[in-house]
Image: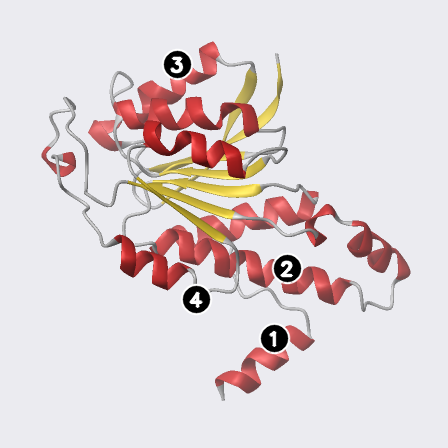
Amino acid sequence: MKKILKHLLEKYKFVRGDLNLHNRTGMLHKCWGHIFSNHLYGDYVEFGVYKGDTLAQSVLQYQQFKTWLENQKKEKEKWRNKVALGSPLNKKIFFHGLDTFQGMPENNEKFFVFDKGNFKASFDDVYKRLNSLDEKVFLYKGLFTETAKQLKNNLSNRKVSIVNIDCDIYSSTVESLSIINDYLQVGSIILLDDYNSFNADNNKGQRKAISEFKNNSNWVIEPFFSYMFSGQSFLICGKR
């Protein structure tokens, strides 16, 4: 029955997502919808993978929109064929996930949820899970500063369309934004999963990090949409 339903959904070009979902699945559906609507080519990068749930869901949402793009090439309206055939999203994108897989690092945020060692996960389990999804997924094990060179090598001559920063604390978010800065482009989405942690205190956590990044980078950054209980997305809207 599931195979029949999948066949019908693909045949009639449905994208199986819900714009009204406020969870991470809905968040990723909106993000990939933005990317495919604008035909913005770029990789997906995630800082803070944990067990790989969000990264795996991002791959699945991407695949649904990729199926939609393929089906557009078969539409009777010729302009749709032309747009789909000319889309830069016909090229392969890569998925990148960075984590120590040892849990939260030592930090001075003084919030028990983010104590050292929390959110520990098995690299081998995550690797096996993500590499069964039929997309190119790079996993980088270690501190962000330790694996940044490897990431940058794999991003050579490439750009990023979505960066998901789910590393919770100020210092790690600052590192993430610094590492990814040169690969952003107009239209890129920045996801801050813990933007409203620390009681939404502007002087702590991801709120402080993105505020400093806005002031110090050359990017024009605007709020996009909120999601879950503390997440906030942002759009790169221009250069200064």
Query: Which of the two labelled residues, at mark 1 and mark 4, occupies the earlier sequence position?
Result: 1
Q: Amino acid at mark 4?
A: Ser
Residue pointed to by mark 1: 9
Q: Residues within 10 Å of mark 2 (few under 14, many from 20)?
A: some
Q: Quadrant of residue 40?
A: top right
Query: Does residue 3 lie above or below 221 as drawn?
Result: below
Which secondary structure lies at badge 4?
Answer: loop
Which secondary structure lies at badge 1?
Answer: helix
Q: CA distance from mark 3 to mark 4?
A: 38 Å
Query: Which of the two labelled residues, at mark 1 and mark 3, occupies the earlier sequence position?
Result: 1
Residue pointed to by mark 2: 66
Query: Where residue 79 sits in the image (x, y, percent)?
Result: 88, 55
Residue at image coords 56%, 29% = 184
Query: Which of the two labelled residues, at mark 2 and mark 3, occupies the earlier sequence position?
Result: 2
Which secondary structure lies at badge 2?
Answer: helix
Give the side of residue 161 with respect to residue 119, left or right. Answer: right
Which mark identifies residue 132?
4
Q: Residues within 10 Å of mark 3 (few under 14, many from 20)?
A: few
Q: CA distance from mark 2 to mark 3?
A: 35 Å
Return the residue nearer the eye: 221 or 108. Answer: 108
Q: Quadrant of residue 103?
A: top left
Query: Which of the two labelled residues, at mark 2 and mark 1, occupies the earlier sequence position?
Result: 1
Which mark identifies residue 212?
3
> Can see residue 205?
yes
Viewer-nearest of discs 1 and 4: 4
Q: Amino acid at mark 1?
A: Leu
Query: Where residue 113 sits in the image (x, y, percent)?
Result: 14, 38
